[in-house]
Image: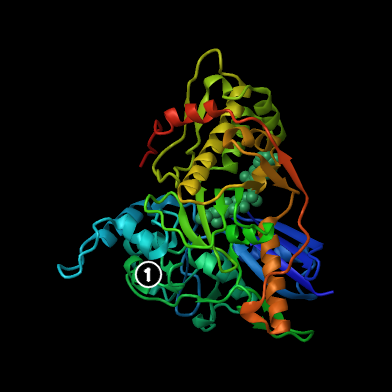
Amino acid sequence: MALVAGVDSSTQSCKVVIRDAETGALVRSGRASHPEGTEVHPKHWWTALEEALAQAGGLDDVAAVAVGGQQHGMVVLDEQGEVIRPALLWNDSRSAPAARDLIAELGDPVTEDTPRSGDGAAAWAQAIGSVPVASITVTKLRWLRDAEPENAARVAAVALPHDWLSWRLAGYGPGSDLTTLATDRSDASGTGYWSPFTEDYRRDLLVLGLGHDAVLPRVVAPWEAAHVVDRPGGPLLVGPGAGDNAAAALGLGMRSGDVALSIGTSGVVSAVASEPIADPSGMVTGFADATGRYLPLTATLNASRVLDAAARMLGVDHAGLSALALSAPAGAEGLVMVPYLEGERTPNRPEATGALHGLRLANTTPANLARAAVEGMLCGQADGLDALRAQGVPVERIQLIGGGAQSEAVRRIAPSVLGLDVSVPAPGEYVADGAARQAAWVLAARASGAGEGSTHPAWEATSVEVHRSPAVPAVREQYAAVRELTGVRPA
Ligand SMILES: Nc1ncnc2c1ncn2[C@@H]1O[C@H](COP(=O)(O)OP(=O)(O)O)[C@@H](O)[C@H]1O
Ligand SMILES: O=C(CO)[C@@H](O)[C@H](O)COP(=O)(O)O
């Protein structure tokens, strides 16, 4: 029995699954926490990966491994391959002004002979499928160029969390040739300097952000080993890996019409598509997936942590928050939470704060506050679903995953807010599972020599619990009425 390993190096933790390559059966697993904060030194991800792998019994008997990871994080390396400074994560909003600058600059006429449209957002959408916001790597590089020019000048290579971890797993690190870095198209598509239309880097946009060229990880095919590690017992194949949302799509076996709603630190609504998407409004990002298709998605900065914060405010645990929310009527008697606790990315409001609206003596109860938190968070995701539909993405089935899917209130209230049945797959680590599935694909493609003609293994589908309840449009209506009425965070 050949074993494969999948890793999810996500915002809050690192999860490892080890599965039978043939059947997909779970054999072992492990997990370790990441530090808090939106700026994290990659060495902490490595320590967490080592700890989670040790818990999962290690890789000695594993034939192939792949890493799925939080997207966009800026890992900058010097000539020696040393990390120059802690990585700015996808949810670090300090590069919001840099995003605005980059959008304006791509819209500027370059010379009289080469006029541009004047619409920088449209120009970015046409170039890379997405309009930059503070989450996108290129904006973080621009921030580095402006705020820490000495560090920017030292940058010899730029990597992402998953490709840096894959590099370390393959035994590379300080002193290694930087051109051994490798990544996949799904994570490359979230950098702001890779085009889903040409399947190639846009080095001009890297230079626009960072101020100079640098080594970028080689983009390998979905079935190709990024690294092959020689070991006495046989080689360890390291797959190309993927961005976490693309890995989840692979783990769920998503097809056209399927939509994943992930309630982790980020709230992500994503779908697989056969053609790339370019949304100049910036609501939908036109990313690539981990199979050769595309993964249009919306991502909010505020999801599971809205529930964490509401539970903290109410002095209850997650089960308590859920029970309270379910004991209140739909609409929380007019109490509405706009959940921009971390600013927001979709819609692009990095400087916003959250707000509670409709407070009256009659409705200020713990139950209504809990309900308003769950509904407000879900209304943000419902807006994302609408944005996907507006791009022509078919929405037939919604699968709810991520840590927030463990909340009974989220599972039961989601259908009434989204206006659709919600399928909840059996509790699991779908990002790590997708990475494991990719590892099995790489292993099989190498054994058969099939390469491009190969497909990922057809592992048995997990059981699914379907939640149904009638749509309650009033919940979204009262949210939409106050969505713009938020505060501005102090400078
Ligand atoms: N029963 C629950 N109800 C609500 N939220 C939960 C529950 N269990 C875990 N969470 C939340 O899920 C989040 C972790 O989910 P996860 O998908 O692993 O996040 P990430 O991928 O961003 O690291 C945490 O914020 C945690 O508090
Ligand atoms: O920025 C994005 C997607 O564009 C986020 O989805 C990150 O990839 C982090 O994911 P989680 O750790 O919250 O699952």
Q: Amino acid at mark 1?
A: Leu
Q: Residue 417: percent from the left, percent from the top?
A: 58, 34
Residue positioned 80% across, 70% down in the render = 22
Please, which residue is most extreme toward the top here? 362
At x 57% / y 77%, what residue is drawn?
A: 173
- On the rendered image, what quadrant is the N terminus found in? bottom right
Here the colouring is rainbow
Dot 1 alpha-carbon crowd within 10 angstroms: few under 14, some 14 to 19, many 20 or more: many
Front one among 103 and 51:
103
Would you say 247 lies left or right of 196 here? right
Compared with 324, 392 (above or below) is below
Residue shown at the point (65%, 28%) measured from the top left: 325
Using the image, determine if residue 191 lies above or below residue 395. below
Asked if residue 468 lies left or right of residue 19, the reply is left
Viewer-nearest residue: 387 or 427: 387
Residue 229 pos. (x, y %) = 68, 82
Image side of residue 248 versus residue 386, left or right: right
Q: Residue at x 55, y 37 (%)?
A: 377
Q: Position of residue 144 (x, y in %)?
A: 37, 63
Asked whether the viewer can see residue 139, the reply is yes
Residue 125 position by quadrant: bottom left
For this rendering, which residue is in front, 250 or 372? 250
SS state under label 1: helix
Farthest right residue? 1
| One can see residue 171 in this view | no
User: On the rendered image, what quadrant is the C terminus found in?
Assistant: top left
Residue 94, horizontal then vertical, whole percent: 40, 52
The vertical placement of 11 against 485, above or below, is: below
| Residue labelled with disc 1 | 206
Q: Looking at the image, which residue sits at the far left?
A: 112
